[in-house]
Image (spheres, rainbow, N blue to C red):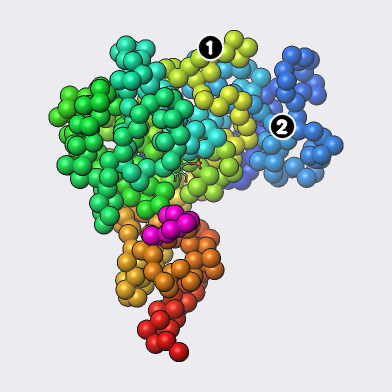
Amino acid sequence: MENRTFTRWRKKSQKEIQEIVRKGLSNNINFDTNNVLGLPASYLDQEVFSSDSNLLKDAPFLTALVHNPNHIGCHTLGESEQYFCGTHEIEKELIEICAVDILKVEPNSCDGYVASGGTEANIQAMWMYRNYFTHELSAQLSDICVLCSEDSHYSMNKGANILGLDLYQFGVNSKSRLGSMREIDSTIERAKNEGKKYFIVIANMMTTMYGSVDELEPILQGLKKHSSTFKIHVDGAYGGFYYPFTNTSNELNFANQAISSITMDAQKMCQAPYGTGIFLTRKGMIAHAGTSAKYVKGNDFTLIGSRSGANAIAVWMILSKHGPYRWIENSFILQKRTDWLCNQLTDLGIEYYRNSFSNIVTMKRCDSLDKLRSRFGLVPDDHEKPTSYKIVVMEHVSIEKLELFITELELEIVQKLEPA
Ligand SMILES: Cc1ncc(COP(=O)(O)O)c(C=O)c1O
């Protein structure tokens, strides 16, 4: 097991968790007893959503949903609305746990917030850097571009499109899923020749389809060679709650000075409700994303605006319930299951890609897999013309389920070899 200390992240009992959430909610506005007239907010409709104290007694997340705190804005920098300051504290602790204990930044040197998902967190990063280049370095929009691999999530295409930026994607090798020095260099050169001076670089910490992880060195070398100005964002929407635990010496965290921001996504490996992307960035940088929102106290540096405080509480509860050492153990178990699956596929002669620190196994399409596709919920890279199918070894993907799949796959292969 990893020998590492956790300064912010501590396992808590259910009682402690309940008490902290109760206290946070009680420090928020009480819509029944406080005389606050101007907020377009209240508890959830009590005729539809029960606020019966017996029902909610041991259910802190449901209680938070019913209390419906609005976490609009970013609470790690400047002022925030005082009406929900009790539960803002829980979100601030969550941001510190992720930034300090998972992604290795010094305490209190990161800002962040709980976004609607990985897509928003990635677009937030691009928006922030676009504004940084234009505000601080007097860049024109046409001087700035987004650079990432062809395996990057389509939120990069969305973000570049919304922000009016050109997107440059370097190709990857079909076996390693990595961009070669030559490919990266020629992509940067092409961007330079097309007038780009400022690069918003996205490095993947586990891609959606392959679980592959980008190497920073060839990207950094290419950018330096072409004397480019850049900022690096890590898309850890998939890997953020997994990869730092399986590859503890990895370079995609804040200990690496080249990295300025990171997306994590609690709605994937963390099993949190949807609406729990996490955006983290070095202190102060997020202010470049700000627009003045006169009716909200403080500035709103986030893309989303109003958002559910219950979501931030849910992620904090999950991390607090498990604690860091159980998290390491759980990742270890998923790694072992993934190893088992890979060994079985190798024995059956099925080609696949797997980054050895990831729980995603992407198999090359073949007739036998086509037959099992819908029965086992295999996810294709392209629904029309699949070239590969992936399995994600999550908590519910037990060895028993994997064994059934392997048995059926073997049958398909044998039947194909010996037609009736
Ligand atoms: C690597 C990666 N980035 C970003 C996203 C987008 O996340 P969301 O669907 O939460 O917006 C995903 C989603 O699968 C992803 O895998």
Q: Is mark 2 within 8 Å of ligand 1?
A: no
Sequence-wise, the earlier of marks 1 and 2 is 2
The quadrant where residue 335 appears: bottom left
- Residue 7 percent across, percent down from the top left: 41, 36
Q: Which residue is mark 2?
A: 67
State whether residue 370 is above or below residue 152: below
The residue under the point 31% across, 47% down is 213
Q: Residues within 10 Å of mark 1 (few under 14, many from 20)?
A: few
The quadrant where residue 31 appears: top right
Q: Nearer the viewer, residue 402 or 145?
A: 145
Q: Residues within 10 Å of mark 2 (few under 14, many from 20)?
A: many
- Residue 388 percent across, percent down from the top left: 39, 60
Residue 65 drawn in magenta: no
The quadrant where residue 385 appears: bottom left
Task: Say which element carries label 2.
Answer: helix
Q: Which mark is residue 292?
A: 1
- Residue 317, can we see it? no
Q: Which residues are magenta?
A: 380-388
Depth check, mark 1 against mark 2: the one in front is 1
State whether residue 156 is above or below residue 419: above
